[in-house]
Image (cartoon, rainbow, N blue to C red):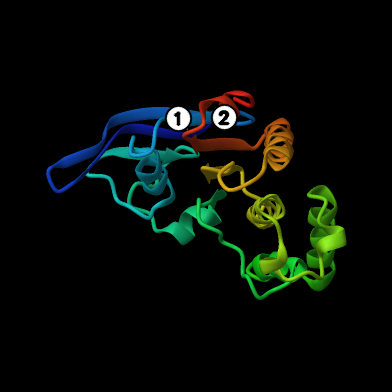
Amino acid sequence: MNLLRAEGLTKSFGKRTVVNNVSFEVNDGEIVGLLGQNGAGKSTSFNMIIGVIKPDNGKIIFQNEDITNMPIYMRARKGMGYLCQEPSVFQRLTVEENILAILETHRHNSDVKYKRLIELLDEFNLKSLSKNKAYTLSGGERRRLEIARALAGSPTMILLDEPFTGVDPIAVSEIQDILIRLKNKGIGLLITDHNVREALSIT
């Protein structure tokens, strides 16, 4: 099923056109990569999809609904999760507290929240780190935590901006495996990356 469709997205800053008539779609269980050098407009396209930037022209359709003018929080409620390139975890909270902070925003009772927390800690190999503060994590561990947080909201699709940046080669392989697992669960994934080799190994 078609999850996301971008139609003719265009964005200029002053006289410089950064994104020019870009169209693509993402389906259930599919990984789509927006690849290119830095400055190619990947992050601008990403930010238009998640709602940080409004396109000058074009439309964004998510699950058959036009969300072009919809605020970020409404897109998240409809099942769109995202990971920005910059670290997004709460540095002074533990791994466990970081995940719970997202679970608390959903209307679950305590038993359901705790069960989901344990599932996410197990799935992303974070159980042994659950009491560690986020600022003590390596780049790869932090990225796993960020993906776990994104999944706490049970999204149908996740957007990842440069997910392999700032992590070592072993962690890159681990993240690639995680993304393939998410794809196999039927989650749609949109990835921006300047490293074509790393992205093409999973798309």
User: Where is 33 relative to 126, above or below?
Assistant: above
Q: Residue furthest bottom?
A: 92
Residue 201's x, y, as percent? 63, 24
Circle 2 residues within 10 Å: few <14, some 14–19, many ≥20: many
Q: Secondary structure at mark 1?
A: strand
Is 68 or 139 nearer to us in this picture?
Answer: 139
The amino acid type found where label 2 is placed reads Ala
Q: Which quarter shows the N terminus?
A: top right
Say left or right for 92 vs 21. Answer: right
Mark 1 in CB contact with mark 2 (< 8 angstroms): yes
Residue 33's x, y, as percent? 50, 30
Occupied quadrant, residue 97: bottom right
Say left or right for 25 vs 48. Answer: right
Is 64 or 77 nearer to us in this picture?
Answer: 77
Q: How many marks?
A: 2
Is 65 or 11 nearer to us in this picture?
Answer: 11
Occupied quadrant, residue 100: bottom right
